[in-house]
Image (cartoon, rainbow, N blue to C red):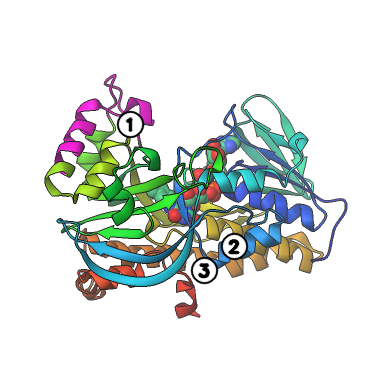
Amino acid sequence: MATSSSRRAVIIGGSMSGLFSAAFLRRIGWAVDVFERSPVELVGRGAGITTHPELLEALERSGAGTRDLGIEVPKRITIDRSGRVIGERPLRQILTSWDRLQRLLRATIDPAHYHLGHTFQHVEAKGRGVRVRFAEGRVEHADLLVGGDGIRSGVRAQVAPDVQPIYSGYYIWRGAPNEADLAPETLASIFPYFVFFLPERQQVIGYPISGFNNDLRPGHRRYNFIWYRVGDARTLKDMCVDETGHQHEYSVPPPLIRKDLIAQMRADAERIMPTAFIDCLRNIERPFFTPIYDFSAPRIVFGRVALVGDAASSSRPHMGFGVAKAGGDAQALAQALAAHDDIDAALAAYNAERQPIGERVMLHGRKLGTHLGVDLKTDEDRRMWKLLQEDDAMMDWIAVPNFLAAYR
Ligand SMILES: Cc1cc2nc3c(=O)[nH]c(=O)nc-3n(C[C@H](O)[C@H](O)[C@H](O)COP(=O)(O)OP(=O)(O)OC[C@H]3O[C@@H](n4cnc5c(N)ncnc54)[C@H](O)[C@@H]3O)c2cc1C
C-alpha cells in the first residue's frame, strides 16, 4: 500500500470495524483517532466468533496477527435428542472469541489515539473534509469520518436515516459455561466439536472457545452455546420488558432480563434438549438473548463519510462472518485510499467494491435463516427451507469457510 503522511481520519466506534479501520489506515500513513462511546474498556461477555480465511487474512495484514487466536475443532457433528451422533463432517475450523479479537486489534493502536467515553453526535462537511461533534462537547476536524459504530450506527442515522435494521422473526439465547463446570459426559461427547442439535424450527449450536483472559488450556476453556428460537414482533416486545418493568426498544441488558423469561426458557430446554446441552445451560449463570436483525445500506459512502462493518450492513449470524466482513471493509477502504490520490475517487471505489459484498452476505444469511421457517415468501425460500430440513445440509451450509467464492 502507498502511504500518505498528512491525512487524518476520525473513526467512530472502538470495536471490530473501528479498530480494523484504524490499523489499516495507519499502515498507509494516515493519522487516526478512534472514538468509542463506552466509558470503560469493551468486553464481549464470552461471545464466540467463528473464523473464516478472510478474517485470518485481515488480522495478519492489519498487523494484529493471529497469535493464540482460539481453538481448532476437527469436525462438526449433529446429535439427536438422545445424544446419539446422527451426522458428521470433517471440517477443521478455528473458533475464537470477541475478547481475543478485541485484544489483538487494540494492541495495534497507540492508547493516546483510542478515546473512550466519546459519543458521536453530528458530522458536517467543512472545507474539503469533515467537522465532527461529540455529545461530550469535543469537536474534531478530519479528511474523512469512518462510521464503525455498529448496527444502530448514529453516523448512518444522520447520513441515511431511512436505512433501518429489520427484525428476522427469531432471536438467540446465548451463554458460555466454563469447561471445568461441565459433566465428563458433556466434555467427551460435545465439547471438542462444532455441534448441531436441530429440533423443528429451532437450532442449537455449540463450540469450544477460550476461557477468561484467553486461557486456552484444557480445563480452563468455555463452550459457546447458541439457541435460535422463533418469536414474532409481539413476543419480542414482551421479552424487551425488563425485570423492573421498563420497556426497551431493541434488547435488554443481560443483568436486567426478566427472571420469568429465563425460568421459562430453562424449562423448555429441559423438555426438548439432549443431556449435554441441558448440562451447558444449567451451567450458564446468566443466559441472555439477542434478537436477530439484518439490513444492507444501498450506499456506504456519503461525501467524506464512509461506513464500515455492521454500520454499513449486518447479516443474520448464520455464517459467523460479521467480523470477517468488518476486516474486509477496513482493508478495502485503506487499499482504495492508497490507490487513489483523490479521496473522493477512492471512496467511490470503496463503495463500488464493498457495498455489493455486504448486500450479498446479508442475502446469504436470509437464505440460511429459512431453516427456521419464518416468513417464507418465494419459491426459492421454500426450496431452501426444504433443503435445510436435512441435518447434513445444515452442516454443509452453516458458518462454512469460503462461501463467498460461490458467488464470484
Ligand atoms: C448472536 C451473534 C453471533 C455472532 N457471531 C459471529 C461469529 O461467529 N463470527 C463473526 O465474525 N461475527 C459474528 N457476529 C457479528 C459480529 O459480532 C459483528 O459483525 C461485529 O461485532 C461488527 O463489528 P462492528 O465494529 O462493526 O460493530 P460493533 O461490534 O457493534 O461495535 C460498534 C461500536 O461502536 C460503538 N458506538 C455505537 N454508537 C456510538 C456513538 N454514537 N459514538 C461512539 N461510539 C459508538 C459501540 O459502543 C460499539 O463499541 C455475531 C453477531 C451476533 C448478534
Q: Nearer the viewer, mark 2 or mark 3?
A: 2
- The kind of residue tagged 2 is Leu
- In the rendered structure, the answer to whether residue 256 lies left or right of residue 152 reads left
- The kind of residue tagged 1 is Glu
Task: Please check the rendered image and state whether residue 254 is part of the magenta-colored stretch, yes or no.
Answer: yes
Q: Look at mark 2 in the image and give the residue it sits on.
A: 56
Mark 3 secondary-structure assignment: helix
Q: Disc 1 and disc 3: Cα gap in Å?
A: 41 Å
- In the rendered structure, the answer to whether residue 326 lies left or right of residue 225 reads right
Q: Residue at x 57, y 54 (%)?
A: 69
Task: Please check the rendered image and state whether residue 157 is part of the magenta-colored stretch, yes or no.
Answer: no
Residue 285, disc? 1
Q: Nearer the viewer, mark 1 or mark 3?
A: 1
Mark 1 vs mark 3: which is more N-terminal?
A: 1
Q: Nearer the viewer, mark 2 or mark 1?
A: 1
Q: Which residues are magenta?
A: 241-268
Q: Residue at x 53, y 53 (%)?
A: 70
Q: Position of residue 25 (x, y in %)?
A: 74, 54
Mark 1 secondary-structure assignment: loop
Q: Look at mark 3 in the image and give the residue it sits on.
A: 356
